[in-house]
Structures are given as C-alpha cells and as structure tokens.
Amino acid sequence: MKYISQIFDIALRELNIVVRKNQIYGFCMLVFPLLTVLFFTTMLDDGVPQDLLIGVVDHDDSSTSRGLIRNLDAMQNSRVKYRFASITEARCAMQEGKIYAYLYIPEGTAAKLMAGRQPKISYYYTMTCLSAGSMASKDLKTISTLGSAAVGQATLRAKGATPGQIKTALQPVTIDAHMIANPHGSYNYSLTTVFVPGILMLFMALLSAYAIGMEMKFDTGKEWLARADGNILVAIIGKYIVHALVFLLVIFLYQYYIFKVLDFPRLGGVWSIVRLSLLQVAASLGFGIFAFGLMPSLRMSMSICSLWFVLSLSMCGSAFPVMGMDPPLQAMSWLFPLRHYFMLYQVTVLNGFPVIDAWFHLVALVAFTLLPWFVLRKVKNALLNYVYIP
C-alpha cells in the first residue's frame, strides 16, 4: 500500500505539471500527434497518386496515335497535360518539374504498324520522385503494349483467326495475380500504419527524456525522489504512468479512426491491437528513459532519441525491405523499436496470425521496455548530484 500511495502521489504531481505548468506536454501528447494522423491520412486519402502530368510529342498525328494518347489520358494515374512540338521542349518541361514523363510517337508509326515493319515509340520518365516515375512508366509501358496488341489483333482477324487463336497468340501465358493484405495497392494502408506510429513513438521517447531532464534543469529531482522515499523505480513508475495513459488514449483513438472510420484492412482481433499499442508505448518510454540514463543531459538524450527514431523510419523495412539491405544494416535493424512494431503489426494485426509467429519481436519490445532497469542508479545519481549544463 505504501508504494501504491507513493505512485499515486507522484502521478498527481506529474499530472499537475502536464496540465498546468508546461504547455509543451499538451502539444506533444495531443495536438501534434492528432495533426500527424490527420496530415498523413488526408494526404494519402486517394490511396495512390492520381492524374500524374504527362506530355506527348506526336509527330505521326494519325488516328492510331491519337487513340493511344486518349487511352493514356483515360488511365487513373496519368493525365495528358501538354502536347509538345519537339523532344527538346518535352525534355525541358520534365527537367523543370512540369511533367513526370512524356511519350514520343515518330512520324510514320501507323503506316509501319499496318505494314508490319515494327515501328518504335519512345517514352521518357523522371525518377527524381520514385513513386511518380514508377507509376508513369507503368502506364506508358501498358499503352505501348496495348497499341501493339491492337494491331496484332487486327492483323490476325484479317487472316481469319478465331478469337481463341487471337487470344492465345497475343497472350500465351495468362497471369493470375493477387495482392495480399493490401488489395487496392493503397499507399495509405501501407505507409500511414508505419509513419504515424513511428512519429508517435518519437514523441513518446522525446518526452520521456525531456521529463527527467526538466527535473534536473529546475532542480526538482530531489523533491520528486523524496516523494518516493528515494526509490527511483517507484518515482519512475509514478511519473510515467500519466504519460503512458495519455499516449494510450491517443493511440486508441488513432486505431479506431483508421480501422473503423477509414476501414483499413486487418484480420487480427481487438486484443492484437491493444497488445501492440501497450508494447508500443512501453518500449518508447523505456527507450527514452534509457537514453537519459546513458547520457544524463537534456540536450544529448533528446538528440539520441531524435536520431534513433528518425532512422527507424528507414530501417523498419516498410519503404525498403530489410532483406535487401547490406548484412550490417540487417543486423542493425533489430536495434530499432519501430522495426519490431512493424513486424508485429504485419503478423498479428494485418494478417491475423498468432503472436507466436512473431515471438522474437514481442520479446524485443519487452526488452526495450526493461532497458531503464540498467540505468536507474545512474538516473538517480544524476538527479541528486549533477549540475544542469545548458
């Protein structure tokens, strides 16, 4: 009972600091996380980029070339915005960022098609923006393939081939493709569920280091420890239980918003979401406390948290697969909490598999939660003896 009353007393003290004395907590716990959720979910609301600007250089000006251009403009990801008189104009427009790609149809394309002389059409795309360039090139390649297929179909039909023979000649192998877990190919489903938790974990780690640093800066750490009779473990639990509850509330609101309001795909149950959220908060707070114990300085500990969690957005494997990285980077990816969060989310929430299939990642998040245990004495010593240096 003694420890429980001390934890409750310290929690009330921390609640008073969060609500009344320091507005940074309110912004970093509520305002900025909610703005982050709204920013990412609205920015990626269409799922994939649409109506990417495409240019056309049509020197043939035939019914065939105009049909290809109309088909390209009708595609979801592309919109033919400009028609250029020369390749030089199109290249300059792409270099200036006005278009992402352009299609070049040389003179005599339709005549060569009908004569079976295999004309060449060219398309150029920029990879300055990886996603836009990839989607533009995909549409241009599709249009080129469809154009040649249409001519081949007309030729075979003129030779008296049956529809079955035409289909077999044009497409000898039928592709049956299935997109698992993200059937719409939505960037919102794949990126929001990683970037938003990653930024929330960054806020949690920063604030956990900041909270102890402020105690040392204003020399209130002795009073904080006195409320726990010098027991640093009780002091830590009482202080961070308020942070954990507030962040859990924000995360549950975020989970409700994406899974119930936006209807993000998931096969896992509610318990898998709750378990992952608890581990997310505990691991982030634990890492922040550990960073302060490692470097008992407000500035240095927050810098460590910022660097580590910003790097984790690249190292977690959502944008670039970890298996494609160099071996040293693959080994290093295990040191980032977001990597384990992402794997648990994929296995238990997105695909609905049992947690035993990702037990190592669960153990890793628990280990991040327990990291402060190794630096508690150092944190206590810093609060009692260190002098704050700006």
Image (cartoon, rainbow, N blue to C red):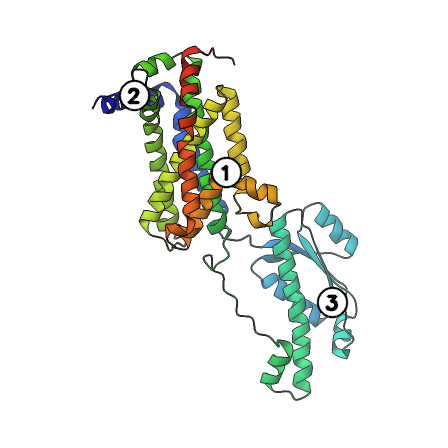
Q: Are marks 2 and 3 in contact (CB under 8 Å)?
A: no
Q: Residue at x 79, y 70 (%)?
A: 108
Q: Residue at x 71, y 45 (%)?
A: 96
Disc 1 element: loop
- Observer able to see residue 284: yes
Q: Which residue is mark 2?
A: 10
Residue 11 sits in which quadrant? top left
Crowd class of label 2 (few under 14; some 14 to 19; many from 20; radius 10 Å): many
Q: Nearer the viewer, mark 1 or mark 3?
A: 1
Tell me the number on the disc at residue 336: 1
| Residue behind mark 3 | 61
Distance between mark 1 and mark 2 Cα atoms: 30 Å
Residue 176 lies left or right of residue 157; in this view the side is: left
On the image, the x and y values in percent for residue 183 come to 47, 60
The disc, 1 or 2, on the residue closer to the chain's N-terminal end is 2
Secondary structure under tag 3 reads: loop
Question: x, y (%) of residue 182?
Answer: 47, 57
Q: Nearer the viewer, residue 223 or 121?
A: 223
Q: Is residue 321 visible?
A: no
Crowding at mark 1 (Cα within 10 Å: few <14, some 14-19, many 20+) = many
Q: Are marks 1 and 2 in contact (CB under 8 Å)?
A: no
Q: Mark 2 or mark 3, which has the lower sequence index? A: 2
